[in-house]
Amino acid sequence: MAEPPADRVETEGRLDDGVLHDGLLDDGVLHEGLLDDALLDELSGLAAGLARRAADLLLEGMASVPELLAAERIGTKTSATDMVSEVDRASERLLVDGILAARPDDGILGEEGTDRPGRSGVRWVIDPLDGTTNFLYGLPGFAVSIGVEIAGRSVAGAVLDPVQDELFEATLGRGATRNGAAIHCTMVGDLGLSLIGTGFGYEATVRARQADVLRTILPAVRDIRRFGAAAVDLCSVACGRLDGYYEVGLQPWDLAAGGLIATEAGAVLGGLDGGRAGAPLTVAAAPGIARALRALLSQAGLPASREAGSGPPRGSVTLGQPEMRHSQGVGTRILTVEDDERIRTAVRMALEDEGWDVDESESGEQALEAFAADPSDVVLIDLMLPGIDGFELCRSIRRTSDVPILMVTARADTHDVVAGLEAGADDYVTKPFQPKELSARIRALLRRARSTEPVRTRLRFGDLEIIPDDGVVRRDGEEIHLTKTEFRLLCELASSSGRVFSREQLLDRIWGYDYFGDGRLVDVHIRRLRTKVEHDPAHPQHVVTVRGLGYKLNG
């Protein structure tokens, strides 16, 4: 973070202008690796609590629906089919009051008219009753949807279906859950075997066009479903009830929570051309069918997104583990993700000279689909990509794959490097770089990934159990997934219980290349390791810091 001007006081991540600065750099861009965990916990907890309160109000309000219908007290908005009730408005008032009571400086955007600017940098995007038609007709398939944005990007979301009593939640970088249990989208790879959801607009002319589109879509998929609530549809993709979903004309309150939940569960989310989701078209799908579904929708004549740049929230994808093929020569496959064709070509030629097979992607979206179809041994990611940027791409791959990731940055800026490492990268290289340097970094990554040298058969440190030969770590009997670099780091610390390792020693032993002086690699990986092996990462009991000396593992 840049230093505040002399006439402004910085206190707990805020300047005295009242604007949130945690996770924001001077360019105003959100970097999830720099977000404060306590802030995310506060926002996600408040969203879930308010969703439950509003859901209770909706269930109570169902009893009054016959009276409202009889008295013709159901209003309309954009058309005669776009209904709104007193219950919608009451639910929005409840949510707004609850947000302002807890966080009076936050902004709020609500479907039923709330448009309140804020001063904190946080904006709540709420749909108090998504699926009003279902609600008024006594059908299931309506929900409360609450999203939270920072710098225009969703960081927390909650969608609660009162009838099914299902609470879907997601926090940026932490995955998605349903009633507290982790959820993931499907890994279907055949569009013809996919169940696809959609919705219809409120204008008659739009509906007629959507009906024409169905003529193309329906014969090419397993079947079509229409649940009647965008947030429910997106959550259905997240938990595998749908393989994909598309809809025209979604608004921010339709997407802020459900879109984040879908991407955190591994779905690819965006417009037809890989740009931002929203009007005019949103597509959310399992990674194995995303490209095919977009191509089919394009063939059917649906429009591309108006803006192909970055936007909230974009694709994450659940990916398989790469199968390590051979040694570091012939048969090793490297995926390089770079939007500059000249750089991409030069990198490919340099890596092929080393005997490696190279796959190329010019965007994050292409890379997600390529990796899902055929995982690589190493992924080389440029941070500055159009659409899904390198930070998101790295985080998406890292969610379920421990493939070695080497990030490429145009400058050795601490913010870029730390954010990339926090997103899950194992190492970084700074432009411009020499081909020999790049090759050496990749070889070091491959050595660590393929090392089978055991430490001891079984190690115990309190509630932590390490089985080096099997690559297994358990805490309280439950297995913890670590990347290969994190596992090597933990085993190195465990090799001499209680011994203090300096940053330089860990750099030499784990990274094995000329990294002297760059303690950021160690510090960020230690933080990542603590989030997985510690009950309270802020107050670690196992991986502890010895001030001025380094790190050690306590028993």
Image (cartoon, rainbow, N blue to C red):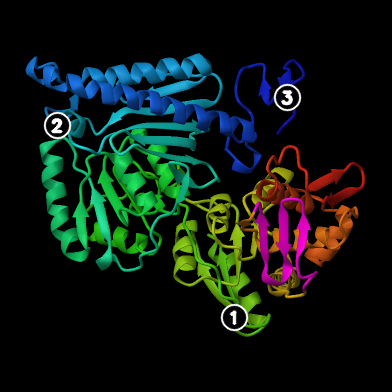
Instruction: Give the left or right position of residue 283, taking residue 363 as reference.
Output: left
Span of residues in magenta: 454-476
| Residues at marks 3 and 1, CA–CA distance in whole angstroms | 51 Å
Foreground residue among 83 and 486 = 486
Q: Nearer the viewer, mark 3 or mark 1?
A: 1
Q: Earlier in the sequence, mark 2 or mark 3?
A: 3
Pointers 3 and 1 in contact (C-beta within 8 Å): no
Tell which circle, 3 or 1, labels the residue nearer the N-terminal end: 3
Q: Residue at x 22, y 63 (%)?
A: 221
Q: Is 315 a magenta residue?
A: no
Q: Which is more foreground, mark 2 or mark 3?
A: 2
- Residue wearing tag 3: 4
Question: What is the x, y in percent for residue 366?
Answer: 45, 62
Tell which of 13 and 97 is nearer to you: 97
Please tell me whether mark 1 sits on a helix, a strand or a loop.
loop
SS for dot 2: loop
- Tell me the kind of residue under disc 1: Arg
Q: Could one spot residue 402 in this view of the protein?
A: yes
Of labels 1 and 2, the one closer to you = 2
**Percent x, y of residue 256:** 41, 36
To which residue does mark 2 refer? Answer: 137
Estimate the x, y position of residue 553 in percent, counting from the top left: 82, 52
473 in the magenta segment: yes
State the residue position of label 1: 325
Kind of element beneath mark 3: loop
Mark 2: which amino acid? Tyr
In the displayed orientation, state which residue is furthest to the bottom.
Answer: 330
